[in-house]
Image: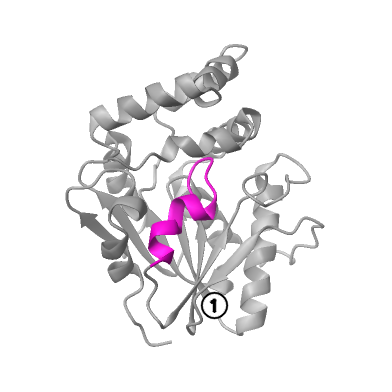
Amino acid sequence: MSEPKKSTSPVHLNVKPYGQGDQHFLGIPGFGATHGKSFGNMLERLPEHVTFHGMDPPGLGESPLPTKWTWQQITNHMIESVDHIVDSTGEPITLVGACSGSFHAMEVAKQRPDAIKELILLEPFGYTPWFLRVFLVPKLGYGVFHSLFGTPQGRGAISKGLAMAGVMSEYNPIASFANVPSKTVHNYLSLYYEIEQRGPDYFDDLSMTKRVLHGTKTFGAVKDSLPTWQRIWDDVSIITIADVGHQLTQDKPQEVNDIIFSPKDK
């Protein structure tokens, strides 16, 4: 695969470095979240050898909207940030994708393989589960989505349901949806479903080191996706974290840090 030209997009994403170590990581947060929401608890515990660059995806947090709501344009914006870090450090970085951020991390790794030395996916879905597909029904899906994610009552109901299902503890990731327009998050969901149609084998040529972390109490769709990652990547490491649901980085940040930031030779 030929390497694409570097992005010349006028949109510059908010990417903030934490720590001053010589091993560089870039974190792409989960669905509708900022990097502070997805990785904040981890950032308080960074080891000395790590610099963690937290990215806000286009339209989220302090990052501007994408110039176009297309998968490739959003990828271009993210690649620009990767290129900037790699140019400044002079060496490849490790990409960390949380939840739906894993889709972005895999895409960036595919289009800029020489810039990525390792790919770490936290709780990745291999497909769009049914409870998210209902929000994509034409003429009806967005209204239902907004009523749940765009209102305090709806967010409260979702949080309670996830807690009862055991996939979320006292940490409330749904609260972050109060800070972003429902249309922006729904646009992302639509793009995730669109690129899913390519099938997971689209990513089978990723040659860098790959690790997948998941909790024992997570969504069934995450667990059901594990055989997919093992099928397309025979060298992938699947790491199970006990007694935690979907919010690995919030509920067990030290354990996640110990795994993904273990010192390595350059």
Residue 130: tell me if it is visible: no
Answer with the quarter of the image where residue 113 lies.
Answer: bottom right
- In the displayed structure, does residue 144 sit left or right of residue 98? right
Image spot of residue 57 (x, y percent): 61, 50
Seen as rendered, the residue at the extreme top is 140
Give the amino acid type for the residue marked by disc 1 in the picture.
Answer: Pro
**Magenta span has 94?**
no
Residue 11: tell me if it is visible: yes
Q: Residue at x 66, y 59 (%)?
A: 14
Which residues make up the magenta segment? 29-44
Q: Residue at x 44, y 57 (%)?
A: 39
Q: Residue at x 68, y 72 (%)?
A: 84
Image spot of residue 183 (x, y percent): 65, 29
Above or below residue 41? Residue 227 is above
- In the displayed structure, does residue 172 sit left or right of residue 165? right
Answer with the quarter of the image where residue 119 lies.
Answer: bottom left
Seen as rendered, the residue at the extreme left is 242
- In the displayed structure, does residue 56 sit left or right of residue 255? right
Q: Residue at x 59, y 19 (%)?
A: 142
Image spot of residue 62 (x, y percent): 66, 52
Assign the N terminus to one quadrant of the image.
Answer: bottom right
